[in-house]
Image (cartoon, rainbow, N blue to C red):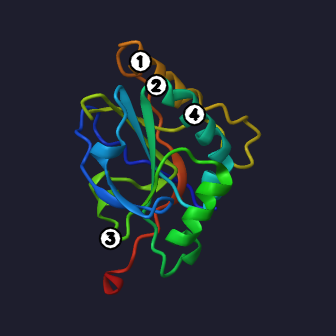
C-alpha cells in the first residue's frame, strides 16, 4: 500500500471555486452552494482507498457533529475512473448512501479541482474559515490502516475547535497520508 503525503498548501490560501457533479443528487454544485457559514472542510477521498475506508465512519460522524456548528463538509473524488472504475460516479453514489454521508460527494472528472487545491492523496483534508481562507490542512489523526492507533479525528477536531473559538490556526500541522490521487495519463485527457 503506497503512502503519499499531502502537499500542504500554504495557510491563508483562498479556496479555489468549483462547480462539480454531486453524485448523490445528480446536480452540479458550486463551492458557494456547499460552504459552511463558519467553516468548510473539503476532503479529497475515493471509494477504493484503504486509508479512506479506514476513516469513513469518523468522517460521517464529524460531519454530523459539526453541521450544527455551521461547519459543512464536502467530499471530492478526482481519481481516474478509466483505470479505477470502482471510483466512478455510480459507485460514489452507492458509497455515499451506504456510509450515510450527509455531505455532497462530488466528482472531479477533469481533475482540475484536485490540481487547483494541490491535492495529492486520499484522504486529503482542507479546512477553510468563513472567508474561505485556508486555516488547516493535514491529517485527520495519526491512525493508519494496520498501525493499531484508534481513529479519533484528533488533529482535524483540534483545528475545527480552534476555528470555532477564534483561536489561531494549530501550529503543528502534519501532512495527511494516503493513496496517491490516480491521475489520468496525458493521452486520456
Q: Determine which residue is flagged by label 2.
A: 160
Pick out the residue farthest to the bottom. 187
User: Disc 3 on helix, strand or loop?
Assistant: loop
Which of discs 2 and 4 lies nearer the camera? The answer is: 4
Question: Which residue occupies 35% across, 16% down?
Answer: 168
Which of discs 4 and 3 lies nearer the camera? The answer is: 4
The CA distance from mark 4 to mark 1 is 16 Å
Question: Which residue occupies 36% across, 22% down?
Answer: 169
The CA distance from mark 1 to mark 2 is 6 Å
The CA distance from mark 4 to mark 3 is 29 Å
Percent x, y of residue 86? 59, 73
Which of discs 4 and 1 lies nearer the camera? The answer is: 4
User: Disc 4 on helix, strand or loop?
Assistant: helix
The CA distance from mark 2 to mark 4 is 13 Å
Mark 3 neighbour class, 10 Å CA radius: few under 14, some 14 to 19, many 20 or more: some
Task: Please give the label number shown on residue 64.
Answer: 4
> Mark 4 vs mark 3: which is more N-terminal?
4
Percent x, y of residue 173? 44, 30
> Mark 3 vs mark 2: which is more N-terminal?
3
Q: Are marks 2 and 4 in contact (CB under 8 Å)?
A: no
Q: Determine which residue is flagged by label 1.
A: 164
Q: Are marks 1 and 2 in contact (CB under 8 Å)?
A: yes
> Mark 4 vs mark 1: which is more N-terminal?
4
Q: Determine which residue is flagged by label 3.
A: 110
Q: Is the residue 131 above or below the residue 181 in the image?
A: above
Amino acid at each position: 500500500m503506497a503512502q503519499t503525503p499531502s502537499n500542504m498548501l500554504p495557510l491563508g490560501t483562498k479556496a479555489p471555486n468549483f462547480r462539480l457533479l454531486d453524485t448523490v443528487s445528480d446536480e452540479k454544485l458550486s463551492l458557494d452552494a456547499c460552504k459552511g457559514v463558519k467553516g468548510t472542510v473539503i476532503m479529497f477521498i475515493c471509494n477504493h482507498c484503504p486509508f479512506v475506508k479506514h476513516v469513513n465512519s469518523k468522517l460521517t460522524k464529524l460531519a454530523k457533529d459539526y453541521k450544527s456548528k455551521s461547519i459543512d463538509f464536502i467530499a471530492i473524488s478526482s481519481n481516474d475512473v478509466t483505470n479505477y472504475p470502482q471510483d466512478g460516479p455510480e459507485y460514489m453514489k452507492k458509497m455515499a448512501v451506504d456510509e450515510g454521508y450527509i455531505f455532497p460527494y462530488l466528482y472531479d472528472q477533469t481533475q482540475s479541482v484536485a490540481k487547483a487545491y494541490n491535492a495529492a492523496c486520499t484522504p486529503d483534508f482542507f479546512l477553510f474559515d468563513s472567508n474561505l481562507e485556508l486555516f488547516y490542512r493535514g491529517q485527520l489523526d495519526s491512525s493508519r490502516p494496520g498501525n493499531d492507533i484508534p481513529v479519533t479525528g484528533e488533529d482535524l477536531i483540534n483545528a475545527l475547535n480552534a476555528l470555532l473559538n477564534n483561536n489561531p490556526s494549530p501550529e503543528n500541522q502534519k501532512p495527511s497520508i494516503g493513496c496517491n490521487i490516480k491521475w489520468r495519463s496525458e493521452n486520456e485527457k
